[in-house]
Amino acid sequence: MYSRALRPCLITFQVHGRHFSSTKQNNRRVTVIGAAGGIGQPLSLLLKQSDAITNLNLYDIVKHTPGVACDISHMNFPAKVTGFTGPDQLKDALRDAEVVIIPAGVPRKPGMTRDDLFNTNASVVRDVALAAAEVCPKALVGIITNPVNSCVPIYCEVMKKAGKLDPNRIFGISTLDLVRASAFIGQAKGLNPKTVNCPVVGGHSGVTIVPLISQCQPAVSFPQPELEKLTKRIQEAGTEVVQAKAGAGSATLSMAFAGARFAFALIRALNGESNVIECAYVMSDVQGTKYFASPLLIGRNGIEKNLGLGKLSDYEQQLVKAAIPELKANVATGEKFVK
Ligand code: NAD
Ligand code: LMR
């Protein structure tokens, strides 16, 4: 049994005086791992606002996680919110989840690379995968934890060892790179950034982040020096936030927004919506690196089709080429950790 302090905060809801009852289409069980953190809390707040989620399980190693769950549960939306804390409750938090979003682990401080987080965060992702392999092997999983380029291979290798790997269901969330590309292009061109859609492919660190500005909708063009400056800004935007926060962490609020966008895309796909397309970092043979981010058509069972890179400009081809050695090394580091 849970101690009083750790007891999950179980809440049922009434909507317009009647108990909320979910339909099959509207019965989604979502678990957030790392839910009490800088990303986890605002992400959970955004997810709670979805009528499509019926169960929102919030897990973190910190003891006040049931308090975070209790707090969010008071928002007047249907999802039943339950808090879980400590390794003993990890499997309960994950059991039968259909969507799992993982923003657990330490963030960067100024002067660090994402790879510097590997030693701490690799085991966090491994342990979640070990538990998920037992209790929710069919979940669609979105990994936010850095270094994403290595953490996705870790998750996949653990699932493979457990005989449960379905690579179509495991995603590294690179959505923040697309959100930033839209924001910066919108600012540069005086467009409403909400209407700007620019694919970003490759991976999620430095030179592996490859914005395909030639494919932006609406179409935009820049003189080469400006294009290079903009590309660099998108690649280094995470560091821009780390420096601005001056030791207090990395992007949390924009990441929560991006993570919610990706989670909602997964839920729309689970609910049978057609034409759900998002970029994400997944197991992939599009560039011979084993894992690569590209636009994906997502359906009820995860990736239905990898849409590949499309036509690239000469400059974008060079960027992809520069990303490949680093991606290969990042993937090897992740795989080696599990072997
Ligand atoms: P944070 O320190 O504010 O929160 C992390 C949370 O994870 C904490 O509450 C901590 O208790 C929890 N945690 C640690 N170990 C855990 C475990 N074994 N199981 C469950 N929870 C655990 O950090 P943050 O700012 O929220 O960032 C989290 C991660 O997301 C970092 O690795 C960061 O680099 C990464 N990140 C990725 C992107 C991206 O675009 N993919 C963007 C921003 C941040
Ligand atoms: C980001 O892009 O903001 C994240 O990957 C966090 C970081 O360390 O930059």
Image: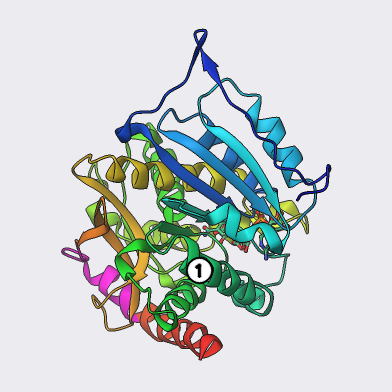
Report if the beta carbon of the residue with label 1 is closer than 8 angstroms to ligand 1. Answer: yes
94 relative position to 60: left or right? left
47 relative position to 282: left or right? right
Seen at 39% across and 78% down, the residue is 323
Magenta-highlighted residues: 307-321
Residue 125 on image: x %, y %: 57, 70
Q: Secondary structure at mark 1?
A: helix
- Could you tell me if residue 37 is visible in this image? no
Tally the numbered discs: 1
Residue 299 on image: x %, y %: 24, 51
Residue nearest the viewer, comparing 225 with 116: 116
Q: Quadrant of residue 209?
A: bottom left
The colour scheme applied to this rendered structure is rainbow
The residue singled out by tag 1 in the image is: 148
Q: Quadrant of ligand 2?
A: bottom right
Is 117 part of what is drawn in magenta? no
Seen at 70% across and 36% down, the residue is 9
Amino acid at circle 1:
Val
Residue 73 on image: x %, y %: 64, 30
- Could you tell me if residue 279 is visible in this image? yes
260 relative position to 1: left or right? left
